[in-house]
Amino acid sequence: MTHGYDSGRLDLPFVGIATFGKRPYVADWSLIDADVAVLGAPFDAGTQYRSGARFGPRAVREASTLFSFGHAGAYDHEDDATYLGGDVRIVDMGDADIVHTDTIKSHANIETGVRAALAAGALPVTIGGDHSINIPCINAFDDQGDIHILQIDAHLDFVDERHGVRNGHGNPMRRAADKPYVTGLTQVGIRNVSSTAKEGYEDARKMGSDILSVRQQRALGAVQTIARIPDGAKVYITIDIDAFCPSIAPGTGTPSHGGFLYYEVLEMLQQVAKTHTIVGIDLVEVAPDYDPTGSTSILAAQILLNLLGFIFHERSA
Ligand SMILES: [Mn+2]
């Protein structure tokens, strides 16, 4: 371990270079030797309203340092569990290169990063960027067997094509559903008006989607919600920060009132980590400049670190 009293340094959260969780930076993607590889995907040219998610990876990394005191792991007294002890090896791959105005090249660079994480046997965790960055993430799973997608989001993101656009942030769940190895989707938190019209919802259901609003999820609770995901499915989780209520997550391009609060999402993530194998994660649409308090980025970092804690706690159990 390189941090904490082990090394003779106190290394408080505000000290040092802000990699994700203050974990080691691995610039050479052929040298990843880790359980988790975190990739930044600072691309926001897929937005249809307010841009700014290109600054998401830096803001989430910065926020993640708050949870990175030098002690070994994070003890949770409610669960009586210590999460993310020194045995869980997390590395930060830095960012995929982004070529301004060029979605194809930028997405290809993100896909290369996710493929490198998978080739190393690490769990890929990609921080957006707008939700279009999920498209190359899912492309990278074309040799990984069947996956099911759990999407936590305000918006369905199931537009096939509009004005020739097929790879914007309104399209990723449709692009995923197009894949033969994506066997189904569970889309939770969907509410209010967005770019997906009625036919998009009909297409989604035809292509294997289970769609739940915030109020429908609340009525079910976490256990019953996650029980709707097929048994034995390998699950890829995509979290759009706008799934949360704008009162706790205003730092995003397309806020939508009536969203989730922290524990509603956390409990779904803890449950799915118990019941299913998680094969990949992305968290998108943090646009920090709309939230001068930084609370949105802290929420994103806290959700990711807790989710990783749950996953590796189950793996070691
Ligand atoms: Mn989205």
Image (tube, rainbow, N blue to C red):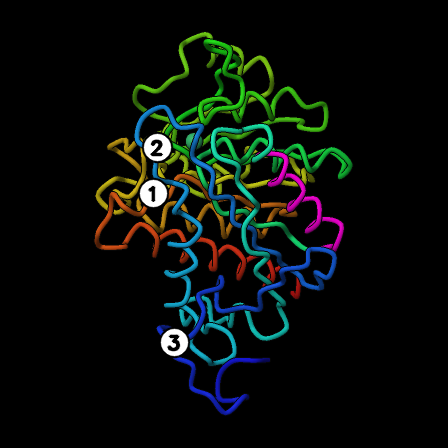
The amino acid sitting under disc 2 is: Val
The amino acid sitting under disc 1 is: Ala
Residue 143, by quadrant, is top right
Main SS, magenta region, reads helix
Foreground pick, 275 / 113 = 113
* The CB of the residue at mark 2 lies under 8 Å from ligand 1: no
The mark lying in front, picked from 2 and 3, is 3
Looking at the image, do the residues carrying marks 1 and 3 touch, with CB atoms under 8 Å apart? no
Disc marking residue 15: 3
Category of crowding for the residue at label 2, using alpha-carbon neighbours closer than 10 angstroms: few (below 14), some (14–19), many (at least 20): many
User: Magenta stretch?
Assistant: 107-121
62 vs 245, left or right, is right
Disc marking residue 287: 1
Residue in the image at 42% along x and 86% along y: 10
Per the image, label 1 sits on a secondary structure element best described as loop
The image shows residue 238, relative to residue 118, as above or below, that is: above
Residue 185, by quadrant, is top right
Position in image of residue 288 (x %, y %): 31, 47
Looking at the image, do the residues carrying marks 1 and 2 touch, with CB atoms under 8 Å apart? no
Residue in the image at 64% along x and 39% along y: 111
Q: CA distance from mark 1 to mark 2?
A: 22 Å
Residue in the image at 41% along x and 62% along y: 64
Category of crowding for the residue at label 1, using alpha-carbon neighbours closer than 10 angstroms: few (below 14), some (14–19), many (at least 20): many
N-terminal of the pair, mark 2 or mark 3, is 3
Per the image, label 2 sits on a secondary structure element best described as helix
Residue in the image at 24% along x and 47% along y: 291
Residue pointed to by mark 2: 214
* The CB of the residue at mark 3 lies under 8 Å from ligand 1: no
The amino acid sitting under disc 3 is: Val
